[in-house]
Image: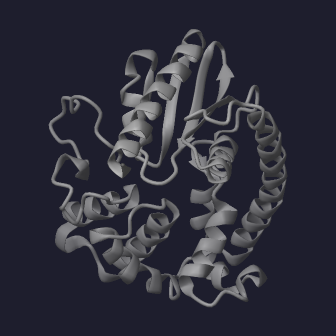
Amino acid sequence: DHHNIQGRIPKARIVVNPKQGSKNSPFYHLAAAGIVFKLAEAILGRKLSKTLKEDMLALAALATLAELVQETGENQKILEQGLPLLESSWRPAVKLFFSSSLTKNCISTREIVWKVISIINITSKEGVFSETYLFLNSQTPEEAGLRFEEFLRKGAERQAKIGELTEELKKKISFMEKDSAVIFEDMMNDRQFPILSTVASRICDFFKKPTFIFTREKGENWGGFRMPFEEDGVEALASCRQLLRRYGGHPAAGGFYFEDKNKEKLKECLAKHFNKNRHKSAKKSA
């Protein structure tokens, strides 16, 4: 895992998480794919062929860019070495990145990759595999093309839904007290987590406030958070841990789960946390 460690480290013979070490370590901010890549290197050793290593490095770069982690240390190294390798990938899906009419006006590999990421970043599954995994593992150009067309269709539907829900929430939040330190909103019965997270991101960008968006299912709420500036969402949830079933992620983005009975208490607790931070910042400025 690569998320912030909360409380005690689980009892296990081996725990692979770069955040056990110093924040100055070049591995500290590794994306999940970067951890997998490093682990594969260590396990395979001399058995890791040049072709396989380059393929894994290219995919690690793709995922590192998608995960929006800090581009420092080993993340920067993976991106610098891996992104150029995508241009010569044998994978039909990756080749499609560079031949699609949607990317013809892009001026760099990074821009091309980011354009495709925004389209294929859908977590629907076919059986036990995500559609993104199946797309990247397409065996023929025809299969890759068909899967990409399906991403485009679903993406258009998703963007319309995201836009609709974002505007609804903007209107609703505008009636809230202007001085509220946090946005804590129920998306009611829309249960698609990727949509929920994207809406949280847009609301956070618009209001410039810590944003927690959630939905309800069978008496439990689950949601995503997004933070502006230097705020830490994981730290905020940790201060309210007694009201949560579980939570985690990065300072700027993550998820949380709580029982319906704790909704108002959690809202109050988060508001108290961010109000306290606001007062601290005001004192420093003074």
Most extreme residue toward the front is 286
Judge whether residue 21 can be spotted in this image: yes
Give whichever of 56, 178 is nearer the camera: 178
Give whichever of 269, 284 is nearer the camera: 284
Indicate the position of residue 240 as horizontal and vertical percent values: 41, 22
Indicate the position of residue 72 as horizontal and vertical percent values: 32, 70
Indicate the position of residue 118 as horizontal and vertical percent values: 66, 64
Instruction: From this view, report whether residue 94 is shown above or below residue 201.
Output: below
Which residue lies at the image location 39% right of the left edge and 16% below the top edge?
242
Which residue lies at the image location 59% right of the left edge and 72% below the top edge?
114
Give whichever of 56, 244 is nearer the camera: 244
Instruction: From this view, report whether residue 17 is shown above or below residue 261.
Output: below
The image quadrant that residue 178 belongs to is: top right
| Coloring applied to the structure | one colour
Apparent side of residue 131 relative to residue 39 in the rendered image (left or right)? right
Which residue lies at the image location 38% right of the left edge and 64% below the top edge?
70
Indicate the position of residue 222 as horizontal and vertical percent values: 58, 28
The image quadrant that residue 98 belongs to is: bottom right
Most extreme residue toward the top is 261
